C-alpha cells in the first residue's frame, strides 16, 4: 500500500470496502458477504498462524468467500518463508492500532506546561492471500461437512454452561427479550433449512444470533438493546448480532443460514455505514467483545464445575 493511501482516512478506506461488499449483493437475493460455511475456516496469518479478529476477520472473510483460501500474510512475511507474491497481484487491507506519543501544551497565567500522552492511531496495511503466490497449489479435496451431532452438543453445552434462560413460549418467533432476560426459539422441528443450510444448521445459527443479543444485557456487556426498528441503534445491534453469530458459527462449525429478515436490515446497514465511517468498527468491536465474554464465562463456569 502506498504512503499516500496510508495517509488517507483509514476508517473511510475500510468502510468503503464493506459498503462495496454489501452493495455487490442484491437485497432480493441476499447473502451477507461475511456469511460462509465453516468448511474453509476462519482467516489466519499464513506465517504466524494467528487468527484475525474483529474488523480484520470481517474484511478477510469476504476475500476467503471468493478465493476459497483463508491464509494471509504481508509481502515481507511471505518472503521470509521463501515465497513470492505473483507480479501484478493486488493486496487486501487490514487494520492495526499504533501508539503515538504526543505532547500537550497548556498555558495558564503566562506559564506554559507540557504533558506527554499516548494515543492510539489506526493504520492500514496490506496482506496477500496464499492463493496469490507463485507456488500456491489449491486444495482440490472436498471439505468434510461438520459432524452435526458434535456441533449440536457443543452449542447446547455452551448455552447450558452460560445459564441462558432458553424458552419456546412463542413457537413461531426467535428473539431475545432483554427486560425478562430470556431467549425464545421456535421448536427445532419448525426449521426448514435453506439453500445453504440444513434445518439443524439453521436452528443453531439462529440460536447463536440470539445468544449474541443475550450478551448485551446490562449485567453482561451492557449494550443499548431497546431501540426502535429502523433506527441507527437498532441497525447497530442487529449488525453486532450478525457478526457475533458469524464469529461463533465459524468456531463451533455451524454453517450460517440465509435469514429471511436480512432484507429488512441491509438498507439500514448501508445508510449507517455511509453516514458514519466508524459505524462498522464499533459494531465489529462490540461483536468481538460479546464473543470474548462468552468464551470467558463458559471457561470460568467449566473450571468451577
Image (tube, grey):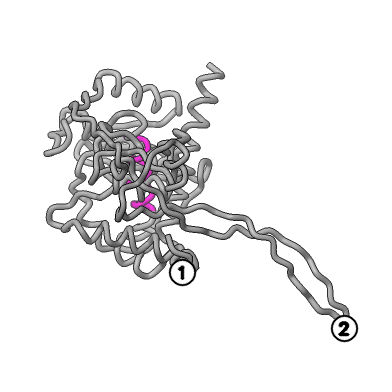
- Residue 108, compared with residue 142, is above or below; it is below
Q: Which residue is mark 1?
A: 4
- The one nearer the camera, 65 or 147, is 65
Query: Mark 2, residues whose alpha carbon is within 10 Å: few (<14), some, or many (≥20)?
Result: few
**Can I make out residue 108 in this image?**
yes
The residue range painted magenta reads 237-249
Q: Is residue 186 magenta?
A: no
Spatial distance from mark 2 to mark 1, Cα to Cα? 40 Å
Residue occupying the point 44% across, 33% down: 49
Residue 164, how many percent across, how many down?
Answer: 41, 31
User: Is 30 positioned to the left or the right of 48 in the image?
Assistant: left
Main secondary structure of the magenta stretch = helix
C-beta proximity under 8 Å, tags 2 and 1:
no
- Residue 218, compared with residue 162, is above or below; it is below
Q: Is residue 240 magenta?
A: yes
Residue occupying the point 34% across, 29% down: 252
Q: Which quadrant holds residue 72?
A: top left
- The one nearer the camera, 303 or 186, is 303
Residue occupying the point 30% across, 37% down: 135
Q: Which residue is mark 2?
A: 110
Q: Which quadrant holds residue 78?
A: top left
User: Is 271 positioned to the left or the right of 5 in the image?
Assistant: left
Is the N terminus in the top left, top right, bottom left or bottom right quadrant?
Answer: bottom left
Amino acid at each position: 500500500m502506498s504512503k499516500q493511501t496510508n495517509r488517507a482516512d483509514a476508517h473511510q478506506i475500510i468502510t468503503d470496502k464493506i459498503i462495496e461488499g454489501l452493495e455487490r449483493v442484491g437485497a432480493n437475493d441476499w447473502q451477507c458477504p461475511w456469511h460462509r460455511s465453516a468448511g474453509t475456516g476462519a482467516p489466519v496469518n499464513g506465517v504466524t498462524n494467528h487468527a484475525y479478529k474483529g474488523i480484520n476477520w470481517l474484511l478477510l472473510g469476504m476475500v476467503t468467500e471468493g478465493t476459497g483460501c483463508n491464509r494471509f500474510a504481508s509481502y515481507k512475511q511471505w518472503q521470509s518463508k521463501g515465497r513470492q507474491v505473483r507480479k501484478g497481484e493486488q493486496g487486501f487491507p487490514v487494520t492495526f492500532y499504533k501508539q503515538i506519543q504526543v505532547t500537550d501544551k497548556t498555558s495558564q497565567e503566562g506559564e506554559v506546561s507540557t504533558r506527554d500522552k499516548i494515543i492510539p492511531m489506526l493504520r492500514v496495511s496490506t496482506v496477500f492471500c496464499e492463493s496469490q503466490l507463485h507456488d500456491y497449489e489449491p486444495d482440490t479435496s472436498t471439505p468434510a461437512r461438520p459432524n452435526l451431532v458434535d456441533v449440536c452438543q457443543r452449542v447446547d453445552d455452551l448455552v447450558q454452561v452460560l445459564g441462558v434462560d432458553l424458552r419456546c413460549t412463542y413457537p413461531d418467533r426467535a428473539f431475545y427479550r432483554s427486560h425478562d432476560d430470556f431467549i425464545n426459539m421456535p421448536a427445532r422441528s419448525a426449521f426448514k433449512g435453506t439453500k445453504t443450510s440444513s434445518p439443524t444448521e439453521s436452528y443453531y445459527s439462529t440460536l447463536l444470533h440470539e445468544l449474541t443479543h443475550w450478551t448485551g444485557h446490562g449485567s453482561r456487556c451492557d449494550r443499548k438493546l431497546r431501540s426502535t426498528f429502523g433506527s441507527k441503534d437498532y441497525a447497530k445491534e442487529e449488525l453486532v448480532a450478525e457478526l457475533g453469530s458469524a464469529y461463533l458459527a465459524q468456531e463451533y462449525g455451524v454453517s450460517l443460514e440465509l435469514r429471511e429478515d436480512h432484507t429488512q436490515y441491509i438498507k439500514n446497514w448501508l445508510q449507517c455505514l455511509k453516514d458514519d465511517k466508524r459505524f462498522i468498527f464499533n459494531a465489529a468491536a462490540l461483536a468481538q467483545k460479546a464473543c470474548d465474554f462468552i468464551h470467558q464465562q463458559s471457561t470460568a463456569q467449566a473450571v468451577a464445575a
